[in-house]
Image: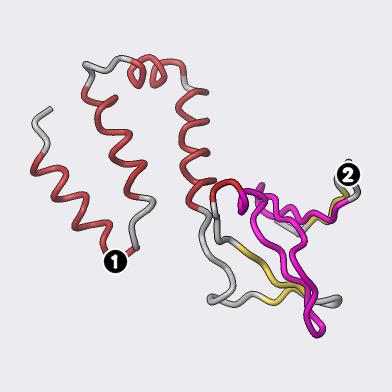
Amino acid sequence: MPLQFIISQKGNKLLLHNGYLHTFYKEGVNKFIWRCYEYKTYKCTSCYTTTREEIVFSIQQIKACRFNLVNFWYRKIKSLSDLQKLYKNQSCTIAKWLPLCFGLAFLPSNEVEDAFLITKLNSRF
């Protein structure tokens, strides 16, 4: 999906990419740095660097936004009425498992598999 540059109602510069909103953070030498719109609220570290001519993608500069990922999952649950009913029923196994899966998003990637297996072994649902 191409980048979209937007001006907010307050006149601020915004960058929209893959459905995620970034605010203009600062200008460097021949580059512009954008950080996640949720940075101040949730300390999301997702950021992009752009130049006037091209987008500079660097693994060190683009980080996953865990807040947006968990929000996406929750919105998806709400959009599927059957799953939403199961999620709200606290005696249901699915309702107990989903929050555990949400928590996996906040672990370093090299620890996710181990944490999932430990959770699975220790759960008595």
* Residue that carries the numbered disc 1 in the rendered image: 110
Tag 2: amino acid? Lys
* Depth order, front residue of 10/54: 10
Say left or right for 24 vs 125. right
> Gap between marks 1 and 2, in whole Å?
41 Å
* Depth order, front residue of 71/18: 71
Say above or below: 122 vs 45.
above
Q: Is residue 15 magenta?
A: yes
Residue sitting at x 85%, y 77%? 53
Mark 2 residue element: loop
Say left or right for 25 vs 111. right
Q: Quadrant of the N terminus?
A: bottom right
Magenta: main secondary structure:
strand
Say left or right for 89 vs 15. left
Residue sitting at x 54%, y 54%? 43
Mark 1 residue element: helix
Say above or below: 31 vs 113.
below
Tag 1: amino acid? Asn
Earlier in the chain: of badge 1 and badge 2, it is 2
> Dot 2, how many residues are within 10 Å of its Cα: few (below 14), some (14-19), or many (20+)?
few
Say above or below: 87 vs 113.
above
* Residue that carries the numbered disc 2 in the rendered image: 10
**Image coordinates for residue 16, horizontal then vertical, percent:** 74, 52
Q: Which residues are magenta?
A: 12-40
